Amino acid sequence: MTTSLVGLQSNYREELRDYRLLCSKAGGLTVIVLVLMGMAMDYVVYPAEQKYFAIVRGLTCAAIGLALLSLYTEAGKRHVQVITFFWLLLPQAMISWMIYATQAEESLFYSGLMLTIFAVGILFPSGYLQTLTFGLATVSLYYIACAAHPGGIQNPSKFQFQLILIFFCALASSIYTYFNEKGRFQLFRLKDEVAHKNDQLARTNENLSQIKGQLLQQEKMAAIGTLSAGLLHEVNNPVNFCLMAIEIAMEEPQAKDSPTLQECLTDAKQGMQRIQHIVSDLKTFAYRKPDVAADDVPFLFEKALDSSVRLSAHELRGVSITRELAGDTLVLGDEAAIIGVLINLFSNAALAMQKAGTASPRIHVTAQWQDGRLHVNVRDNGPGIAEENLARVFEPFFTTREVGQGLGLGLSISYAVVERHGGTLFAESQLGEWTAFNFDLPRAE
């Protein structure tokens, strides 16, 4: 028997116990009502014994009621089958006493015994052995009732016929219960399989959603790469011409004799160089080498940080960026992907501080070596993250931004990027004071 089948059967028994508990409570109340309503039959068939029968019916109902009350205890819930079997025998014992007290095999009450046997087999989720035992106990009670009758058995053939009939009812009810039990287990098994399939489908849909989101991000990056490649080609020539012209102009005597003109030419040169850097950063960010593993390429984290700050400059206006880096920041990995992680962290921090109206917004980046890995901390002085959201920030499509301002995929993709580098991205926050994101990268030996 496989482990999964053992677990399935264990779950089935647990569910069946709850179902048996419910059926026992409902069935017990129904039997109490039927036993009390039987006084109408006593009035019609045996009016002389009606008073005594009413007392016996009342005592039987009280005993069944006590059994039902025990089902509300922990011990009763654990032994629901035994308690149910006990109280089901009570009406059988009552009917057998009535047969004994009236006409023995001539009594019409024997039909009540058969009806109860069929009801137990059809309506109660009992095992076939329990149903068979219940049927044989009923046969025994009927036999004792007739044999112990003061006048004895007056009509042996009728007694034997009814005894065999009751036994056939017990046997038929047990066979029905056996197949009903197998069918119930098969139904539970199918339900369990459907539940597992639904869980798998939900996980598949979630994975597909993540993949779709990542593909969207990659398509955007590819588009940026194509655009920046064209820009690099188209812009480089005029920028080089401008730089060459500025260099020549700076060598002219008039420029050397004029500090103001020299300063203007220097500013123009720096502006042209900044254009070159921005286009180069775009190309680095957007282009990746698909045939190179993430941890095979050494790069300076400091350079990736510079690129991410330049590319996020429009969102970081008014935000003070400070840093505290180790002397050597050479790491292994995908530089473009790490730039993307930093851009996402900067963008989220800047937007949160802008939305909260943070006074003197600032972001502090630290990067220190520990156990052969560069541990990076990006901390802002923004509004912080609520505790109930802190554990969900890396969930795909989870976002606190307004509709249309984000897909909620940035941190999820960033988490996957860091994980691909053998590290972990996690968040810390103090609501109303600060938020920090931490991740680590491997050292380039």
Image: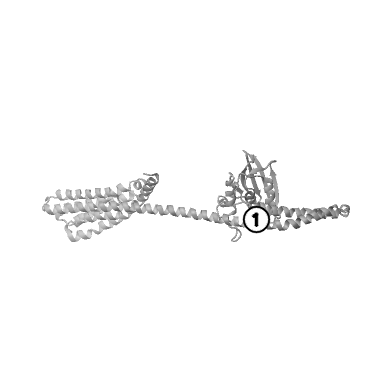
**x and y percentages locating residue 113 in the rendered image:** 21, 54
In this view, the residue in front, 318 or 95, is 318
**x and y percentages locating residue 120 in the rendered image:** 27, 53
Residue 325, by quadrant, is: top right
- Left or right? Give the position of 230 relative to 91: right
- Left or right? Give the position of 261 relative to 424: right
**Residue at the farthest top position:** 371
Secondary structure state at the residue bearing disc 1: helix
In this view, the residue in front, 351 or 375, is 375
**x and y percentages locating residue 4 in the rendered image:** 40, 46
Colour scheme of the picture: one colour
In this view, the residue in front, 77 or 58, is 77
**Count of numbered tags:** 1
Q: Is residue 162 visible?
A: yes
- Left or right? Give the position of 2 relative to 88: right
* Amino acid type shown at disc 1: Gly
Structural crowding at the residue carrying mark 1, measured as other residues with C-alpha within 10 Å and reported as few (<14), some (14–19) or many (≥20): many
- Left or right? Give the position of 187 relative to 402: left
In this view, the residue in front, 261 or 405, is 261
**x and y percentages locating residue 191 in the rendered image:** 39, 54
Name the residue carrying label 1: 225
Q: Residue at x 70, y 58 (%)?
A: 231
Which quarter of the image is occupied by the N terminus?
Answer: top left
Which quarter of the image is occupied by the C terminus?
Answer: top right
Q: Residue at x 15, y 50 (%)?
A: 146
Q: Is residue 382 visible?
A: no
